[in-house]
Image (spheres, rainbow, N blue to C red):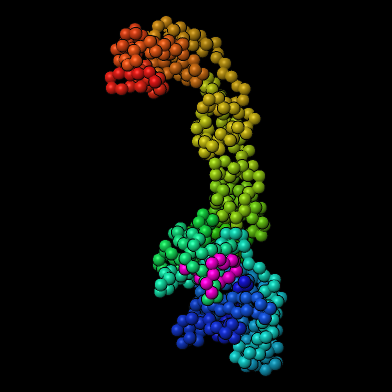
């Protein structure tokens, strides 16, 4: 269902026109009726002669209520721009046009209202003026239709033009619904109600939703659109959601309703940026407000140049590539710029600006996801998908919920090979670099490090270590002689010398332990594998239950050796200790 939004200067007849088109008064509040101007958003709907249902959002024209206007204009499909024939182009006419132009709203029509108050010559001059003002903007080719909301003159022609425009618009549907809340209230017997325009997906009754950015969960108890109760609603419609599980003060204008885990929030993003046509230059320093969806946020420009800017906000915002926004200078009380989100979660400012220029927000979702991952290098799948309008990267490496671009993965493979080579050079007697250490130095998970090794032609896994493929540790003559001496001393008796007494080089000791040439029983005791086998045989010769003393006597060892050996046997699962006795497992 197309959403038609009004725009234009205060008191130029927007609300009167909506009432004439729909039969409904969009001014909801007593103060609006008393003062004769729209303060907040108003809504109406009707069915066009060809059967097309359309919604209308009526926005305030007074500059004091511009932020309310901005809360309702982003979701519109068709602009109904209103200029009074008796007053002509006014300051808010220019600013409202700038908003539509910055949001790239290109489908619209100009209603030249109060045509009954001017003669034909003045009406023609007003038409020429409006046409000239539209030049160079997104609405420059729009029809100008003289109407009178009071007499009804020109209304039929306006309706036919609107009907023709509706055939050229279609609601966005990326399968990820979002509803920017523009109103929240409590209804007697129902609870919390929120209203907004549903974008980008569908919502069902009893569906679980999330309130962003707070992350509060809720459930859709009921759905209403155009005063009709429905069980299912699609994009492009004005919607009221009855939410359970959330209080009225926990959701309000500026929040976004979406499905759980389908959106991410950010306080920093890169965007394309262009100034309003009446602004010469945008400066980094200034008091700015960001208007996106129905939300408004104080914002700082931390990077600016060549059509790209980096923004930071104090509160997180749910963002995806392509989201449109406008920027308002609060000091000048003026809309000064607008743009589209390019990277919702960028890295360092300078690199982020350069990388974001390669993002085309109009590309398909998978292309966006692929490009975003190329910039990130690696990221969680759900974050890339959320930030790229639901897309999935092409040719990505997926490991344990993490995605890596092919280029980033190749970089990791090269870096891993270099780290292992450095380990071999520094510690030539070691088998290689422990996998956990490699993962830490690459700053990746163990799972990614394993995948890097398995896909590398230059690396192989040797037990817990990673080594260069085909590498064998060759003992130099001095190390070989040292090992033969130590092995002879160990083999002489089960009452072996301590590690300290052996005096083995620490690197040689480490290597032989890794190779299985030695078995470490305690910090300062090692035995040869064949000695361990002999001790196992001794254990099997003992009674079903035995004491330390019985094992000591059978092995001909002192408690200095017997106790560490039995404690090692317990850890290895060879024996089970029960009080002062042990049994074989």
On whether residue 23 falls in the magenta region, the answer is no
Q: Is residue 425 above or below residue 310?
A: above
Which residue of the protein is positioned furthest toward the front in this rendering?
A: 544
The answer to if 229 sits in the magenta stretch is yes
> In terms of depth relative to the viewer, which is nearer, 140 or 226?
226
Q: Is residue 17 above or below residue 392?
A: below
Residue 112 sits in which quadrant?
A: bottom right
Closer-to-camera residue (257/132) = 257
Which residue lies at the image location 64% right of the left edge and 59% below the top edge?
361
Spot occupied by residue 340 in the image (x, y as percentages of width and height): 60, 62
**Magenta span covers which residues?**
228-242
Residue 58: which quarter of the image?
bottom right
> At which x and y percent is residue 126?
67, 86
Q: Give the x, y percent position of residue 246.
A: 42, 64
Residue that extends furthest to the top in the rendered view of this protein? 492
Q: Residue sitting at 56 percent across and 18 percent down? A: 473
Residue 503 visible within the image: no
Residue found 49% across the figure and 15% down from its top: 517
């Amino acid at each position: 269902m197309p959403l038609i939004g009004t725009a234009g200067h205060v008191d130029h007849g927007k609300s009167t026109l909506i009432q004439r088109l729909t039969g409904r008064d969009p001014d909801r509040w007593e103060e609006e009726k008393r003062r004769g101007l729209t303060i907040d958003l108003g809504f109406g709907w009707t069915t066009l002669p060809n059967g097309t249902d359309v919604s209308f959002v009526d926005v305030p024209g007074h500059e004091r209520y511009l932020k309310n206007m901005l809360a309702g204009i982003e979701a519109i499909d068709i602009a109904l721009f209103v200029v009074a024939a008796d007053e002509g182009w006014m300051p808010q006419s220019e600013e409202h046009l700038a908003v539509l132009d910055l949001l790239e709203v290109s489908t619209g029509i100009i209603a030249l209202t109060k045509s009954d108050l001017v003669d034909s010559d003045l009406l023609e001059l007003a038409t020429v003026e409006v046409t000239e003002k539209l030049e160079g903007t997104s609405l420059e080719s729009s029809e100008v239709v003289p109407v009178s909301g009071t007499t009804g003159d020109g209304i039929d022609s306006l309706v036919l033009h609107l009907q023709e425009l509706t055939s050229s618009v279609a609601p966005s549907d990326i399968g990820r619904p979002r509803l920017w809340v523009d109103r929240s209230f409590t209804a007697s017997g129902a609870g919390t109600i929120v209203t907004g325009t549903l974008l980008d997906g569908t919502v069902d009754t009893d569906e679980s939703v999330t309130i962003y950015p707070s992350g509060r969960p809720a459930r859709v108890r009921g759905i209403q659109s155009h005063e009709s109760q429905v069980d299912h609603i699609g994009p492009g419609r004005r919607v009221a959601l009855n939410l359970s599980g959330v209080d009225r003060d926990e959701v309000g204008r500026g929040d976004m309703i979406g499905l759980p885990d389908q959106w991410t929030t950010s306080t920093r993003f890169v965007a394309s940026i262009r100034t309003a046509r009446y602004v010469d230059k945008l400066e980094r320093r200034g008091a700015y407000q960001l208007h996106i969806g129905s939300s408004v946020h104080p914002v700082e420009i931390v990077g600016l140049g060549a059509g790209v800017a980096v923004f930071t906000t104090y509160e997180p915002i749910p963002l995806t590539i392509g989201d449109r926004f406008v920027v308002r200078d609060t000091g000048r009380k003026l809309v000064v710029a607008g743009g589209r989100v390019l990277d919702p979660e960028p890295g360092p400012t300078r690199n982020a600006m350069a990388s974001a220029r390669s993002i085309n927000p109009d590309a398909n979702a998978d292309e966006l996801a692929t490009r975003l991952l190329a910039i990130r290098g690696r990221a969680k799948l759900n974050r890339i998908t959320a930030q790229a309008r639901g897309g999935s990267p092409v040719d990505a490496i997926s490991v344990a919920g993490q995605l890596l671009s092919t280029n980033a993965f190749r970089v990791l493979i090269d870096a891993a090979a270099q780290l292992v080579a450095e380990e071999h050079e520094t510690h030539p007697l070691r088998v290689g670099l422990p996998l956990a250490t490699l993962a830490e130095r690459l700053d990746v998970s163990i799972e990614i490090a394993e995948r890097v090794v398995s896909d590398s032609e230059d690396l192989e896994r040797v037990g817990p270590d990673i080594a260069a493929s085909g590498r064998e540790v060759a003992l130099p003559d001095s190390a070989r002689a040292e090992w033969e001496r130590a092995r002879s001393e160990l083999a002489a008796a089960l009452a072996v010398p301590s590690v300290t007494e052996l005096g083995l080089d620490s690197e040689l000791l480490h290597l032989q332990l890794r190779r299985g040439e030695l078995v470490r029983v305690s910090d300062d005791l090692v035995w040869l594998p064949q000695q361990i086998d002999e001790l196992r045989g001794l254990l099997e010769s003992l009674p079903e239950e035995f004491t330390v003393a019985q094992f000591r006597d059978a092995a001909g060892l002192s408690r200095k050796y017997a106790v560490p050996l039995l404690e090692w046997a317990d850890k290895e699962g060879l024996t089970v200790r029960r009080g002062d006795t042990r049994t074989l497992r």
